[in-house]
Image: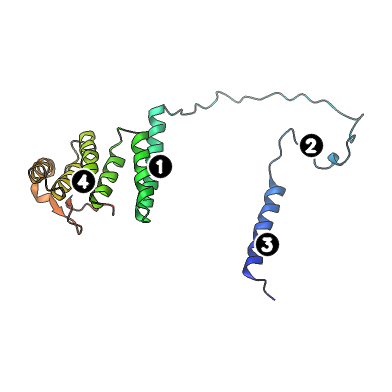
Amino acid sequence: MRLPLRYRWFSVVAGAIILLIALWPRTAKDPPPGNSATPNAGVGSAVTVTVEAVHNGPEPQREIDTPAQAGEKHSTLLNEQAMNAWYGGDLRKAMTLFEQAIAAAPDDPVPHTNYGRLLTVMVIFDRAVPLLERARDLQPENAQAWLDLATAYQRAQLFSKSWEAQAQAAKLVGAASITRDAQGRFVVTGTTLSE
């Protein structure tokens, strides 16, 4: 006779907990498993042992992150979480996470770019354009940064600025390398944008 699914899960979880307890590493402060049953076990027969630490050479140097590196790592994680929220359809959460990523590393162009793209898709151009301008300023030699900005300008009906941004991208990769993707965004040929 087979157990219902909820009982099988319970037995699997209970078994995992039992194994975890049985295999939990013991420290020097943990009492030995056999003598701890009675309060005076081993009294009168105690042996004192002195243990000295053994050093086998120089200690390995640990890499210590500077605050800027820690901020960048945190920003990268927040950006990934924001992208996952965006893909999952939770746009409010994505927006909050993008804002946190930008606050953690204000000079990282990736969250600026991704947040600007999201806001462009959401038709919130007054917020998208400054983010994409900042991303472009952080990486002026990146043609896609110029093209993301050109897309936002065009959709905001700032056509002369869109043409200028397209021209800057064309200087970097050549006009023949600029196309539009399925959503009508300007992209460098062979580039697939998120979302």
Query: In the displayed structure, does residue 9 sit left or right of residue 118?
Result: right
Q: Which mark is residue 125?
A: 4
Q: Earlier in the sequence, mark 2 or mark 3?
A: 3
In the depicted structure, whether residue 12 falls above or below residue 101: below
Quadrant of the rendered structure where residue 8 is?
Answer: bottom right
Q: Which mark is residue 77?
A: 1
Taking the spot 65% from the left edge, 60% from the top edge, the residue there is 12
Q: Closest to the observer: 154 or 144?
A: 154
CA–CA distance in space, label 3 to label 4: 55 Å
Disc 3 or disc 4, which is closer to the eye?
4
From the image, tell me which residue sits under label 2. 31
Disc 2 or disc 3, which is closer to the eye?
3
Give yes or no for contact between labels 3 and 4 (Cβ–Cβ under 8 Å): no
Query: In the displayed structure, does residue 88 sit left or right of residue 149?
Result: right
Q: Could you say whether the residue bearing mark 1 is in a helix, strand or loop?
A: helix
CA–CA distance in space, label 2 to label 3: 30 Å
Badge 4 density bin: few <14, some 14–19, many ≥20, Cα 10 Å: some
Name the kind of residue labelled 2 in the image. Answer: Pro
Q: Closest to the observer: 58 or 30?
A: 30
